[in-house]
């Protein structure tokens, strides 16, 4: 763990904290919730207030539930509105996350309009919900040895980049247990030694898009993008729908009751092999190796940096996999939420296996700079787990709290992160130091 003064010099929160507005069909009602502290940061025991505003509605009140960690109800009630405005109050006496769920009364049988408000209490003090296994490092070092025993045997198939100044290839590599890694590679035609970027994918079963690599190659990167699955990257859409509804249905829960059989074992080691491949290419500059992705891709980015010592920066938006056993600390678990994926399985075995795949336990192995985006009202990849992971990182770290974000990008809700991503990206491709911004707590 790191001390609070060290963390304070390494993190940043961006902008004020608002809720995501939701609008009904037909009536156009809009419900807004935002904390009265500009950044949504509070001290333990401090009264947390959210301003509520209703637009295009004759409602005279709203209903609210305030939940500690998004799980435990602290208070509920009704708030009267005056000219469409009201205020909700709550308090949290220890470091954590408070989530306010606010709803309008249903109108004319329409669905309820719901909005969320968030607040963080001393997030720099958050720690993992579960204990790191004593043999965590030994387990993963053993798996890397198993991987090394399987030659990568990379095979490239040249394709059309669509741009005269760029090269493009599809790539396949051999992998553990008879599986394969599939991806795409692009680079500028000019330049003997280039900085490298590995792009890893968010959750789901889908093809890879060529522009995901060509757009970065046009900036000067040697860029590799891999699928999370042992699937070809450019089949027709129905192929992926069939896979997602068939053998890969609910793939995150496959084998999750044993650290040896988890679906994520192959995925994590795929990332290592992809990073290793880039470092072994003669056109890598030997200095810069960046890994980036969002959600499941953010998870893979953090894990790659933990496993591969040559990763020099991580850019991870709303990273998944943080605090898989979150309910042990009275907070929501991060996706894929193994804590609750226990149907027809031994719960204790699932939760023990989760400790070996939890990003919070990889974090202390990460020494390179990290840019992480966090949605303050994200219930898929909740803020406490991501902060717990960031607090354990050992390198310069910048955290961007996304003021409008649940999990997905809506109405520019992830824009603050991508603004910082662009700044980091430009510095890294030029071989410059990353422009980490400082963090300020609610007490400063």
Image (spheres, helix red, strand yellow):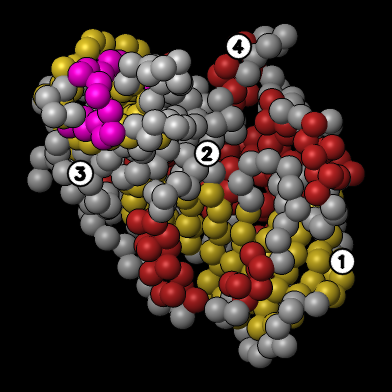
Is residue 211 part of the magenta span, yes or no? no
Q: Is residue 188 above or below residue 317?
A: below
Instruction: Give the number of marks.
Output: 4
User: Mark 2 near mark 4, Cβ–Cβ under 8 Å?
Assistant: no
Residue 119 lies, in percent from the top left, at: 25, 32
The label on residue 320 is 2
Where disc 1 sits, the SS reads: strand
Q: Does residue 125 appear in the picture of this structure?
A: no
Where disc 4 sits, the SS reads: helix
Residue 258 lies, in percent from the top left, at: 70, 22
Which is the main secondary structure of the residues drawn in magenta? Answer: strand
Question: What residue is rendered at 45% in x and 15% in y?
Answer: 109
Residue 139 lies, in percent from the top left, at: 65, 35
Question: What residue is rendered at 62% in x and 11% in y?
Answer: 347
Q: Is residue 431 above or below residue 302?
A: below
Question: What residue is rendered at 18% in x and 29% in y?
Answer: 84
The label on residue 48 is none
At label 4, counting other C-alpha atoms closer than 10 Å, the crowd grade (few under 14, some 14-19, many 20 or more) is: few
Where disc 3 sits, the SS reads: loop
Q: What is the spatial separation of the Cα atoms under label 1 and label 3, in whole angstroms?
A: 49 Å
Where disc 2 sits, the SS reads: loop
The label on residue 348 is 4
Query: Nearer the N terminus, badge 2 or badge 3?
Result: 3
Residue beneath label 1, please?
A: 155
Query: Nearer the N terminus, badge 2 or badge 4?
Result: 2
Q: What is the spatial separation of the Cα atoms under label 2 and label 3, in whole angstroms?
A: 23 Å
Residue beneath label 3, please?
A: 39
Look at the image and give the residue range highlighted in magenta: 48-70
Query: Nearer the N terminus, badge 4 or badge 1?
Result: 1
Q: Closer to the camera, 25 or 262?
A: 25
Query: Nearer the N terminus, badge 4 or badge 3?
Result: 3
């Amino acid at each position: 763990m790191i001390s609070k003064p060290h963390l304070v010099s390494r993190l940043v929160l961006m902008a004020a904290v608002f809720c995501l507005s939701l609008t009904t069909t037909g009536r156009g009602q809009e419900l807004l919730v935002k904390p009265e502290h500009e950044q949504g940061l509070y001290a333990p025991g401090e009264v947390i207030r959210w301003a509520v505003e209703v637009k295009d509605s004759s409602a005279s009140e709203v209903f609210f539930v305030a939940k500690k960690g998004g799980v435990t109800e602290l208070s509920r009630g009704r708030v009267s509105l005056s000219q469409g405005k009201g205020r909700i109050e709550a308090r949290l006496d220890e470091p954590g996350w408070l989530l306010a769920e606010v709803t309008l009364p249903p109108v004319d049988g329409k669905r309820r309009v719901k909005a969320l408000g968030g607040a963080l209490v001393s997030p720099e003090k958050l720690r993992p919900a579960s204990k790191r296994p004593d043999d965590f490092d030994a387990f993963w070092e053993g798996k890397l040895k198993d991987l090394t025993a399987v030659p990568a045997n990379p095979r490239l198939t040249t394709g059309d980049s669509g741009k005269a100044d760029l090269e493009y290839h599809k790539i396949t590599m051999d992998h553990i247990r008879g599986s394969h890694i599939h991806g795409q590679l692009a680079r500028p035609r000019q330049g003997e030694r280039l900085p490298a970027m590995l792009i890893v994918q968010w959750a789901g079963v889908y093809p890879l898009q060529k522009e995901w690599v060509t757009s970065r190659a046009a900036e000067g990167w040697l860029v590799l993008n891999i699928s999370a699955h042992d699937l070809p990257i450019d089949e027709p859409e129905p192929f992926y729908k069939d896979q997602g509804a068939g053998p890969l249905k609910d793939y995150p829960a496959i084998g999750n009751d044993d650290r040896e059989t988890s679906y994520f074992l192959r995925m994590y080691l795929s990332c290592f092999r992809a990073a290793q491949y880039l470092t072994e290419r003669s056109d890598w500059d030997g200095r810069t190796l960046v890994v980036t992705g969002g959600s499941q891709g953010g998870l893979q980015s953090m894990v790659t940096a933990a496993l591969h010592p040559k990763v020099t920066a991580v850019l991870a938006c709303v990273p998944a996999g943080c605090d898989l056993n979150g309910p042990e600390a009275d907070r929501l678990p991060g996706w894929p939420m193994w804590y609750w994926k226990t149907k027809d399985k031994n719960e204790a075995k699932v939760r023990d296996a989760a400790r070996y795949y939890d990003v919070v336990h990889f974090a202390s192995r990460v020494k390179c700079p990290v840019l992480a985006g966090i949605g303050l009202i994200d219930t898929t990849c909740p803020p406490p787990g991501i902060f717990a992971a960031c607090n354990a990182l050992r390198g310069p770290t910048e955290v961007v709290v996304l003021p409008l974000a649940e999990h997905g990008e809506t109405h520019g809700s992830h824009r603050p992160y991508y603004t910082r991503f662009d700044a980091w990206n430009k510095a890294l491709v030029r071989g410059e130091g990353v422009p980490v911004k400082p963090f300020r707590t609610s007490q400063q």
